[in-house]
């Protein structure tokens, strides 16, 4: 997994309408990039809703929030519309960004191993350097913790 002080990789994503972009497109502004396993599942919905509830507070300090999963853009659009989400949801369908950030990991459930996205959040400075990393995120209270870190900058 990328660490504090690392520079973010140049990798392409798609927004929920299928429009391509890179994290470098936001250069000069701080970003919060959070990785989540799958749209419209309970934990991922709670996390997106928590970031949405605080979206205005993040925007007030000039921070964009981007949620990344391997879901297709159409699924992300449906997810955002269903819950009125105000965060930018990004599709990493091919998994290059998840791999580059180190969030594509081996997981296990009920004795079965499989590959999946580890829930993690990265606070990225205006210069593209990672300021803070939250690995293995627990959803409850997480968005508030990230906002407190952003406001302390």
Image (spheres, grey):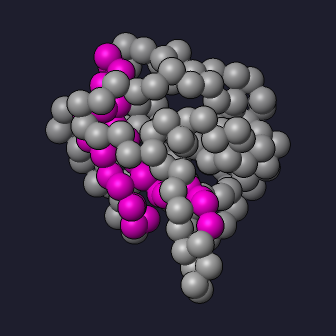
The residue located at (46%, 25%) in the rendering is 9
One can see residue 9 in this view: yes
Q: Nearer the viewer, residue 8 or 145?
A: 8
8 is higher (above) or lower (below) than 112? above
Q: Nearer the viewer, residue 112 or 45?
A: 112
Specify whether residue 123 is painted magenta: yes
Q: Quick check: 17 left or right of 61?
A: right
The quarter of the picture where residue 27 lies is top left
| Numbered label tally | 0
**Which stretch appears magenta?**
114-139
82 is higher (above) or lower (below) than 97? below
The residue located at (55%, 74%) in the rendering is 108
Q: Residue furthest left?
A: 152
Relative image position of residue 111 (x, y in whole percent): 57, 84
The residue located at (30%, 30%) in the rendering is 6
Q: Quick check: 82 left or right of 125?
A: right
One can see residue 76 in this view: no
Relative image position of residue 32 (x, y in whole percent): 41, 37
32 is higher (above) or lower (below) than 69? above
The residue located at (67%, 56%) in the rendering is 39
Q: Nearer the viewer, residue 84 or 118?
A: 118
């Amino acid at each position: 997994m990328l660490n504090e002080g690392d520079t973010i990789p140049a990798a392409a994503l798609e927004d929920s309408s299928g429009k391509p972009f890179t994290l470098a497109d936001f250069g000069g502004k701080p970003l919060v990039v959070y990785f989540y396993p799958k749209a419209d599942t309970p934990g991922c919905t709670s996390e997106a809703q928590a970031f949405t509830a605080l979206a205005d507070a993040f925007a007030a300090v000039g921070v964009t929030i981007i949620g990344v999963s391997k879901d297709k853009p159409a699924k992300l659009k449906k997810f955002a519309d269903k819950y009125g989400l105000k965060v930018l949801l990004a599709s990493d369908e091919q998994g290059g960004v998840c791999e580059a950030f180190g969030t594509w990991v081996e997981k296990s459930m009920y004795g079965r191993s499989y590959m999946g996205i580890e829930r993690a959040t990265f606070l990225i400075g205006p210069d593209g350097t990672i300021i803070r990393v939250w690995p293995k995120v627990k959803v409850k209270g997480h968005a508030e913790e990230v906002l407190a870190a952003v406001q302390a900058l």
